[in-house]
Image (tube, coloured by chain):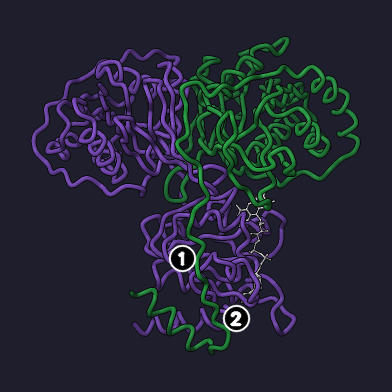
Chain colours: A green, B purple
Amino acid sequence: MSTAYQIVVCGSIVPDPLQTLEPIASPTGPALKNEMMLPAVLDPWAGHALYEAANLAKNQPGSKVWLVSLGPKAKLQQVMMTVAQKVPFELVALDGSASGFTDATETAAALADAIAAIPGLDKSRLLVFGGWESASRGAGATMQMVGERLGLVDQFQGVDQLTVNADGSLEILERIEGGKHQVSKCAGAPALLGWATGNLPEPRNNPQVGMVNMRTVMPALQKAKPTKLAGEGLSFASVALPKQLRETQIVKDKSPDDIAKEIVEWIKK
Amino acid sequence: METILVLAHTETDGSLAKPVREALHAAAALHKSLAGSKLLVGLIGEDVQAAANSIAASPATKYFGVTGADFSVSRYATDAAAAEAIFKAAQATVVVAPATSRWARVLPGVAQRLGGRADTHVTGVAVADGKISVNRWYYRQRMEGVLTRTQRPWIIGVDPGSHTPCECGAGAASVEMVPVNLTEANKRTTVVGIREPKADAQTIRPDAELLFVTGAGWTKKQADGQTHVPEAEKLILGFLKQARASLGSSKSLVDLGGEGQAVLPFLSHLNQIGQTGATPRHAKGLSTCCHGEEPHTVGWRFIGERRAISLDPNCGWARGKADVLYVADAFAVVAKVNELLAAG
Ligand SMILES: Cc1cc2nc3c(=O)[nH]c(=O)nc-3n(C[C@H](O)[C@H](O)[C@H](O)COP(=O)(O)OP(=O)(O)OC[C@H]3O[C@@H](n4cnc5c(N)ncnc54)[C@H](O)[C@@H]3O)c2cc1C
């Protein structure tokens, strides 16, 4: 039995991890210094979710992938220039903050509304994907809240593998403590999966896929709904970089034997 | 006036894991600092009596339980229903819970269901001016925030290892059972089992003193113009065995596996440390053949003492990321270390 899934991936953008980040106080709460100038990338775990979604759609004829993204429109556009070349999807854009200091509850409300408004959405075929944590807030909370709002109680987090069985049931591997996976079987869609790394490499850029995607990406960005995240009831007393930069002792001229002795003493200490 | 509920699940053997005692410690400290507050405990599992007894001497004044075979497994739908029921029975305003994988999956959804808020990966809980505040990290452990919230209920997921466990001793606790009505819709998912590497191939050991990190250098051409992957494998596994260390890796090294190159078969993405990997907690960390770039070292936030071995004196570790950087050939050093460890 092959199901034509509607796979909705939630994923936004984050600053390129090679950038130096510095928190500042802004009138609306904490922010990053030069936030709008920092080069951005697709949030990595959400990226894995997107590639897994595309792969699943390819193997389940008739399936379709949407990417629902809440971020500053101009930055979204920049990042979509590369992401759109990776795999086929239809973008649903929301114009608002992608800051890590926004509230998961408010982000989830905006995402769930956007998903519910997708024309022709059929819950019986719905799989909602996302990263199990963002690289900005890093909370691992948004997806569960999106799921609750959409009435999805078959939820999985830290997913590394999804297999669709012949009977339409889903076998899912989730990360648990100590380098292990829990294996679960879900009767079928609808379900929500927060992905960890999965098993797929990042797809190569494919300009043809990019051209097809761009036909919907640009209009989606143009009509991106302004979304305000007010941070109701939430206040930050401080946001600071860790103080301790270590005084690194650089040992250059010791023999491997001497270094080994020192390391063994240190390990046993 | 806050009613603080510690929400916990039992292990399969009915016991409570260490992170529960840590959350209990954090919650008890809150309770002590908040005049007039109440401290309650909610337990979920197949049978919770033994677990309740094991912490009966805690300052909590009441214990709630949801029990039955349906609640022995880690499953969103049943865990959410159980947590919701206990929360309502306890009429809590603040929930403190250990952020185990089981609770991390479900608690934010429970907060949503209850119309509250959730903060996860919390590393500190405090009271100032009668207000609760929590510490957590943003941008993958790059900066630490302290925040407060006015909304209730407020679910606080405490990161395992971030608090000392409570010393509260055993006794006889009386547990008020809370009924939960499950429907078929709660049981569309069944937990089939746990998949884990064979005992001798299990390289991730959260309880180890030492984290041993391997980088891509182990698979690169060495001074003789050749790669030495089989030797690297022997040295790394030898070290892990002797030092009983947990194995972490850079992204570059684990990614090689996906690209079909000859790599170390015992490494997977689960070993990856950093921005898109894990942030484990260990007293010490030793990095080998890894460059110590920022996306990697953010995963070292909760490692105490840090040492690194790299051929490159200008690598990231040299710039305040490690306490000691040995500029040396890790093949030679680790071979000798293994020899010394084996000799006792
Ligand atoms: C979005 C994004 C997310 C990322 N997330 C992560 C992450 O989570 N974790 C992560 O690790 N990286 C991450 N990275 C990648 C990161 O930027 C680095 O590319 C990566 O950490 C480099 O790995 P490495 O140090 O093992 O390899 P290399 O940079 O190749 O360094 C190898 C080192 O080995 C040394 N060496 C070689 N031979 C020897 C020897 N015999 N003895 C001693 N030293 C030797 C070399 O001198 C060199 O310093 C991310 C990057 C991006 C863009």
- Asked if B40 appears above or below B237 in the picture, the reply is above
Residue B329's label in the rendered image is: 2
Q: Does the residue labelled 2 lie within 8 Å of ligand 1?
A: yes
> In the figure, residue B262 lies in which quadrant?
bottom right
Examine the rendering and report whether any part of residue A195 can be seen. no
**In whole angstroms, how far apart are the C-alphas of marks 2 and 1?**
18 Å
Q: Which chain carries label 2?
A: B
Label 1 amino acid? Gly
Q: B277 or B307: nearer the eye?
A: B307
A150 displayed left or right of B82? right
* Label 2 vs 1, first from the N-terminus: 1
Mark 1 element type? strand
Q: Can you identify the residue that label 1 sits on?
A: B285
* Residue density around tag 2, few if under 14, some if 14–19, many if 20 or more, within 10 Å: some
**Where residue B11 sits in the image (x, y, percent)?**
30, 39
The residue closer to the viewer here, B304 or B149, is B149
Number of marks present in the image shown: 2
Identity of the residue drawn at 45% across and 68% down: B240
Q: Where is residue A64 in the image (x, y as percent from the top left)?
A: 74, 23
Point out which mark residue B189 bears. Answer: none
